[in-house]
């Protein structure tokens, strides 16, 4: 019994797409456009790349994890030792960030950007406030 | 909580951005935000994304970011927000707010603004377990919201086990189970065990004269 809709989560992103045919349902296969939309990572000849960083993929792994324009994102993420999880149905997946990528980002001291809504639903990005000092503070009702 | 400070400093190229770590979203955060009549951006973070990005573990926690988008003070508690000694709470908070004022006025010349090396040295470690915990929490929260509560809870529980230092994960999970349940006996037990291991619930920020407050 196949699932009709895939939800792919990643930090700050959410994608809903139809599963690609002809792949095992316990793996997450995405076309290149969806992989980039979901995670910002693109598969290039140099490897899996995002911004200036590229992780190289061996020919053997490519053979296994790439099928035309489709990429086995779950396999790639496992290969790169990044968090990848799904619900029991394999209909909702998360492609997580590696600790090394988070650390590297924070060590650069460039404040990670984010986009979140206010109570009117209007979206605000941290980068909208460039040019001002920002005191960023969290809170919760609990 | 920061509206007064924001009003005082907003003409100095300074803003406050508050982020509500609220997986119930508007239902929990909307009322307090409206009541605060805050003039600064008050954002709602259902997936605790900002806690992931900045390696945060509790609320309230704060980060200072300069005009170029650089971290000047990484994650810390903005003055002790929990103390059985209300006098101490008020004093430590006052010290912290004065420090923010100093930074607003003097920028990188402020004694409270860390140099890049000092800031880097104070970044808490982002471990593989912490990264995995965030993935578990995010997936769990999504499943919970979309009606798959049992499975969602299991992923969130895993997040609390992978990152036992995260009060955000633990208390948010309890809050989703029961909106009034984030501070019950399980929480108190966890606080006690954490204290026994030498971990403060709200460690004081590293700031001159903060430790001398009694």
Image: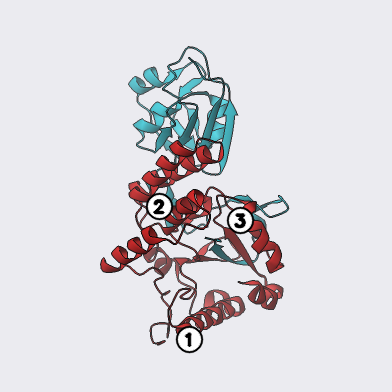
- A8, B208: nearer the viewer: A8
Can the viewer see residue B145?
yes
The tag on residue B79 is none
Residue occupying image coordinates x 61% and y 51%: B25
The tag on residue A103 is 2
N-terminal-most mark, 3 or 1: 3
Badge 2 marks a residue whose secondary structure is helix
Left/right placement of residue B198 relative to residue A130 reads left
> Distance from label 1 to label 2 (Cα)?
37 Å
On what subunit does the disc labeled 2 rest?
A
> Distance from label 3 to label 1 (Cα)?
29 Å
The image position of residue B39, as x and y in percent, is 72, 67
On what subunit does the disc labeled 3 rest?
B
Chain A is which colour? cyan
Do the residues indicated by labels 1 and 2 lie within the same chain of the protein? no
Local crowd at mark 2 within 10 Å, few (<14), some, or many (≥20)? some
The image position of residue A82, as x and y in percent, is 38, 38
């Amino acid at each position: 019994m196949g699932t009709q809709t895939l939800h792919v989560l990643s930090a700050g992103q959410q994608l809903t797409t139809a599963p690609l045919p002809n792949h095992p349902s316990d793996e997450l296969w995405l076309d290149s456009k969806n992989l980039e939309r979901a995670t910002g990572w693109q598969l290039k000849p140099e490897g899996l790349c995002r911004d200036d960083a590229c992780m190289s993929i061996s020919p053997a792994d490519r053979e296994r994890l790439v099928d035309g324009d489709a990429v086995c994102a779950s396999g790639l993420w496992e290969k790169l030792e990044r968090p990848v999880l799904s619900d029991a149905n394999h209909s909702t997946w998360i492609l997580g960030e590696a600790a090394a990528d988070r650390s590297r980002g924070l060590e650069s001291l460039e404040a990670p950007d984010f986009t979140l809504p206010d109570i009117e639903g209007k979206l605000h990005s941290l980068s909208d406030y460039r040019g001002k000092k920002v005191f960023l503070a969290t809170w919760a009702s609990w | 909580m920061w509206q007064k400070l924001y009003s005082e400093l907003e003409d100095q190229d300074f803003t406050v951005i508050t982020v509500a770590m609220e997986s119930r979203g508007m239902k929990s955060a909307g009322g307090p935000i409206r009541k605060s009549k805050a003039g600064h951006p008050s954002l709602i973070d259902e997936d605790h994304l900002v806690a992931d990005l900045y390696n945060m573990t509790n609320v309230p926690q704060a980060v200072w970011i300069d005009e170029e988008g650089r971290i000047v003070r990484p994650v810390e508690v903005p003055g002790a927000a929990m103390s059985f000694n209300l006098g101490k709470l008020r004093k430590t908070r006052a010290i912290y707010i004065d420090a923010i004022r100093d930074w607003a006025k003097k920028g990188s010349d402020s004694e409270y603004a860390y140099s890049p090396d000092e800031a880097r040295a104070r970044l808490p470690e982002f471990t593989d377990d912490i990264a995995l915990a965030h993935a578990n929490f995010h997936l769990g929260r999504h499943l919970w919201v979309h009606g798959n509560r049992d499975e969602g809870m299991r992923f969130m529980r895993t997040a609390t086990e992978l990152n036992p230092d995260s009060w955000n994960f633990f208390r948010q999970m309890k809050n989703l189970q029961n909106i009034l349940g984030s501070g019950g006996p399980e929480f108190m037990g966890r606080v006690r065990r954490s204290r026994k291991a030498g971990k403060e619930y709200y460690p004081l920020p590293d700031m001159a004269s903060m430790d001398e407050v009694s």
